[in-house]
Amino acid sequence: MTDLVQLLVAGLATGAIYALVAVGFTLLWQTSQTINFAQGEFVMLPAFFVLAAMKFGGASFPVALLLGLVASLLILGVLFKKLLVDPMIRHGVLPLVISTIALALFLKEGVKEFYAADAQPFPALWATTNISIAGAVIALQNLIIIGVAIAAIAALQWFLAATRTGRSMQATAQNPLLARILGIRVERMILYTFLINAGLVALASVLISPIYLAKFSNGETLGLVAFIAAIVGGFNQVRGAIVGGLLLGVLDNLVAAYVSTQYRGAIPLFLLIAVILFRPQGLLGRIEERSV
Amino acid sequence: MSAVLEVRDLKKSFGGISAVGGVSFEVHAGEILGIIGPNGSGKSTLFNCILGQLQPSSGEVRIDGKPITGMRPCDLNRLGVSRTFQLLQVFPQLSVRENLILAGQEHQGSMWSRLLGRRDAGLTTTANRMIEFFRLASVADERAGRLSYGQQKLLDAAMAFMAGPRLVLLDEPAGGVNPTMLADLRERLRTINDREGATFVVIEHNMEFVMSLCTRILVLAEGRLIAQGTPEAVRRDPKVIEAYFGN
Amino acid sequence: MTRARRLSGAIAALAVCAALVAAPFGLKPYGIYLLSLWAVMTIAAMGLNLTLGYAGQISLAQAAFVGIGAYTAAILTTQGWPFALAFVLSAALCFAIGWLLGYPALRVQHHYLAFVTLAFTTLVFLVLRNEEWLTGGIYGISGIPRPDVLGWSTGAPRDYYLFCLGMLGLVTLATGWLVRSPWGRAFMALRENPIRAASLGVDTRRYTLIAFALGAALGGIAGALYAPLVQFIDPTPFALGLSLNLLLMVLVGGSGFFFGPFLGALVSVLLPEWLRFTEGLYLLIYAAFVMALMAFCPSGLLGIAERLFRPAAKTDDAPATPAGKAAR
């Protein structure tokens, strides 16, 4: 039983990270019809910004974190939108998908060539201690991860619901034409979603890299999980992405522990296929409704 | 002799909104039936329910006495029912002639003959006849996307006739067409009706077009049939005037 | 097309064929291998071009079919079955599975379909990797023999290349016939406007399934040719990466253009070799090239060619591009 609790907490922690990535992915789709096949690489990259700042810039870890965040916002947010998405979006979804696939390759190979091909250790923000709750031994890092992710998502939800900008973003997601007529600066709202995504993936990167080490190939699995979480939860809304992410994290851990590990990766895939075929709006989504 | 098209008590609701609230009518062979009504009266929904693009909530549709309610559009088409759409839907990348051949190719032979048989499915002659009839000869080899709007409308209509259908439903064929082309279109439709005995049902807003083309008119308002009769009778019917202009 | 045009087109085609046949003479075995790889990848890409470029169905499953075809051929021929039989079974098996994969396409479209096919590819990869009793798992299958074609042994690199080239030629003829037939027209209608197509009598359900099945069968054929080419297979090449690569090939060449896959496969197979001097950077350059191409001409290289050489193109060369349609 205590094992189960441990597994659940660990699963929720991984799931929380998946949720962050899935939320960003969903936001991009909602506001600008962008399916970012490079989302996994977006999570892989910020850790390397931080490492590079420390290695080449001699920065201390906290400063490097800040620099990494800024770099992420600029490159994965602004540049991504202006250089890749904007020119492409008028050609339709497929060219943009192809471009993000190429971008994923570009980022992956870029890190491999210009930084390192082997896994790099990444400093943790916390001590690797365990604490005991009701007899179950739980790694502190898992609780911290869950806490940080909850805080981030709560902040995001508050921003979207309670601030004017946030509500404008929701309006843009639901009906860009109407939003424009109402005087909302649609282009700027879309830019904000890209920035938010950049922030979310940077956070996820910093949370996950201490555990799994920073490696150029991390993006592959992470990307796939992000898609699955977003769709299973419900491509329509942020809540769906959160639920999807948590569900996948927990499921993955439980399956690895209790079922054969060889087909561990198959469970999310079956879930994805089942959801798309039988309930395409996702577990939480509503048909034909879009919201941020 | 059963009617070519029989609609019995057709209803369609979207959630709580009733778009079509129990419409019944018949169309006989060789007729040109017009359906008019103010915006939102349910005309297009009615068409879509008859033609399989939408599933009716209740009611029945029969072609030549056979029930066809909820049949797939492609199967319906092969029974001899064809249609045009409000929003122009020709295939812009294919040539005019190719569009016409496409419109006719699924009506004859089998899947195998379509794979292994003639490239044009033997339809070049028929297509050329259509091109002649609708006066599109000058653009026959152009991509349909390059045609003027009016020409595309003519092509759209021509495609509906390629399969030599029993019944053609035209959804606002006059929309956006200039008066000269309009007269052309009306004349072509009348000629086909005379020559081939094709039966039409036409939804239109353009009163002049409808009144001069159709032999009988149905008036819909708020999803219900409020009048039917000859163009003159309908024009004078007080219920119709009220539906359009209020009292 | 005028007579002169047709004649010069035929001469050009003959010249290209002659060049392709003569190509291996004077090349080192590795060069011949690359040419054979190009031929095989072109077949796989042609399958995807059929499903995606002509019929408008987005599929990320092509790698799975190449894998299934390769493993079917490898398993059977290493057990002593004749290649011809293994080849036919590969194609038939992939046709059947592709047909089944078409059913999800009837329910969902566009990006949802992409994700379903993506999941399918990853699942097939997992099966190939885990079912050691059948596929040898991560240890793969080695010693895959090259066939004897009507008494002529294809063991040598040049001979196997000519065999692949011959198969490519046959596939090209068959696909060319298909695309110009009423089926081809129906596919294009399905891609451009499925609702209108249905209202004209096009059985969109059946044509969708056929599009998937045929594209898959071509993938299977490519796989069956790939296995004897490399003579040792393991699951690694048949993962999602190959599906993405094939997708890139189709779009780089020009989606829906008949010869798009030829160009796309050429770029994908040969560019890394030409860029070898840049050491590790060639993938970076390839990726940058693809992004730039998509930004400036999403209808691919043949789209550029069409714009340059036939600005007022007539329908004989009607490109069929899903680009430009925002899938909402």
Image: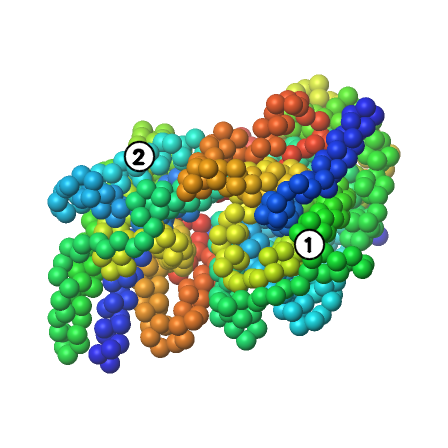
Return the mark for residue C95.
Answer: none
Task: Count residues near mark 1 (Cα–Cα under 10 Å), then give few for <14, some for 14-19, many for 20+.
Answer: few
Task: Using the rendered view, name the quadrant where residue C7 is placed.
Answer: top right
Which residue occupies the extreme bottom position in the image? A1
Q: Nearest the camera: A221 or A157?
A: A221
Relative image position of residue B85 (x, y in whole percent): 64, 38
Relative image position of residue C319 (x, y in whole percent): 65, 34
| Residue in the picture at 23% in, 43% down | A52
Q: Secondary structure at mark 2?
A: helix
B30 horizontally vs C138: left or right: right
Residue B100 in view here: no
C150 horizontally vs C209: left or right: right
Question: What's the CA distance linking mark 1 and mark 2?
Answer: 54 Å
Instruction: Give the residue type at disc 1.
Output: Ala
Q: How many marks?
A: 2
Which residue occupies the extreme top position in the image? B180
| Residue in the picture at 43% in, 30% down | A87
Residue B178 in view here: yes
* Chain under disc 2: A
The residue beneath circle 2 is A78
Return the mark for residue C156.
Answer: 1
Relative image position of residue C131 (x, y in whole percent): 52, 72
Relative image position of residue B88 (x, y in whole percent): 63, 33
Dividing the image into 4 quarters, which one contains the N terminus of chain A?
Answer: bottom left
Task: Using the rendered view, name the quadrant where residue B189 is placed.
Answer: top right
A78 horizontally vs B182: left or right: left
Instruction: Give the residue type at disc 2.
Output: Val
* Chain under disc 1: C
| Front disc: 1 or 2 | 1
